[in-house]
Image (cartoon, rainbow, N blue to C red):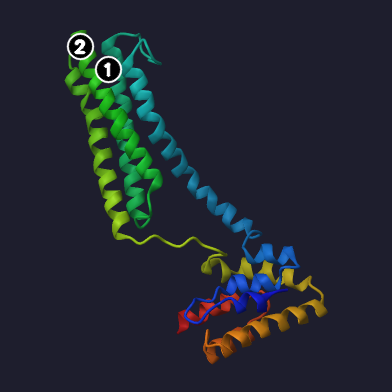
Amino acid sequence: MSAAVTASGIMPGEVVPWGSLERSAFEDFPDVVSQLRGAAVGGRYGRSFLYFIPLGVLVAIIYAAPVWGLATVVGPWALSQTSRTAEGDITVAGVIFIIALLSLLVHFVVWLASGRPRGAALLGSAGMSLALGGISAGVAVVRGNDKSVPDWGIWILPMLGTAVVGAIIIVLVLLARRRTPKRPEPTSAAPGMQQSPEYLASVRASVARVGDEDQRAIRADLSAAIDDLRQRGVISPSEASTASAARLGELAGAMASARVRG
């Protein structure tokens, strides 16, 4: 139990990491610390993970399609799935790049709808689309001319389109990154989860398994930490009052709610 020690290192003007402070008080009880970190609320967040499966499939298609398209248009020296004729390779590759282009556009729409996050996955897929689409178009031009493939100029359009759209998306994502400050890494359970009934129930159950004497010692440790912060002007008297009134295990949530109300 070292909440008081943790509090002593927080200087006036700094934001108090209430979650870390409370976890310090419960450091001798790993089960409670795990609950405070949100590690045991897997039911809700495990189910929400299922919503990301379609997005994961989409990203896999985006990454795989340009590679497959390039391998096809290269022909006999790669993994062509056609009869190994230049006309067949270029035609099939064009169809594959139509799929790649549509998938990339869907990924871009998902990125826009999600509030324009950092977009690392989108940058990766756009970069592959730019590079492989451009290379595939070049190979299609060479093979189309060399083998006198009819309509090769039509089938390179999806390849060129994928490359151009990839370049545009890269520029847009980089511009969005410059305009959006980098978000700090989360250090504890998200505020929304802290307020959820599932989170509170799991935390309260783990705290209830701590003996009464230990609970009193933890409360005394937290009280000493709160008093130290108040006396040094790190927090206001009203914040100290709110923190002191919070139930064990719910300090971070109580202070987050207080900030919202304020």
For the C terminus, the quadrant is bottom left
Q: Is residue 87 above or below residue 246?
A: above
Left/right of residue 19 with respect to residue 51 in the rendered view: right
Please provide percent x and percent y for residue 130: 28, 34
71 is higher (above) or lower (below) than 98: above
In the image shown, does 192 or 231 lie closer to the viewer? Answer: 231
Q: Are marks 2 and 1 in contact (CB under 8 Å)?
A: yes
141 vs 26, nearest the viewer = 26
User: How many circles with numbers are drawn on the protein?
Assistant: 2
Badge 2, how many Cα within 10 Å: few under 14, some, many 20+? some
| Above or below 81: residue 26 | below
Q: Which residue is mark 1?
A: 90
In the image, residue 16 lies at what x, y percent? Answer: 54, 76
User: Residue 134 occupies which quadrant of the picture?
Assistant: top left
Q: Which residue is mark 2?
A: 149
Label 1 is placed on what type of residue? Ile
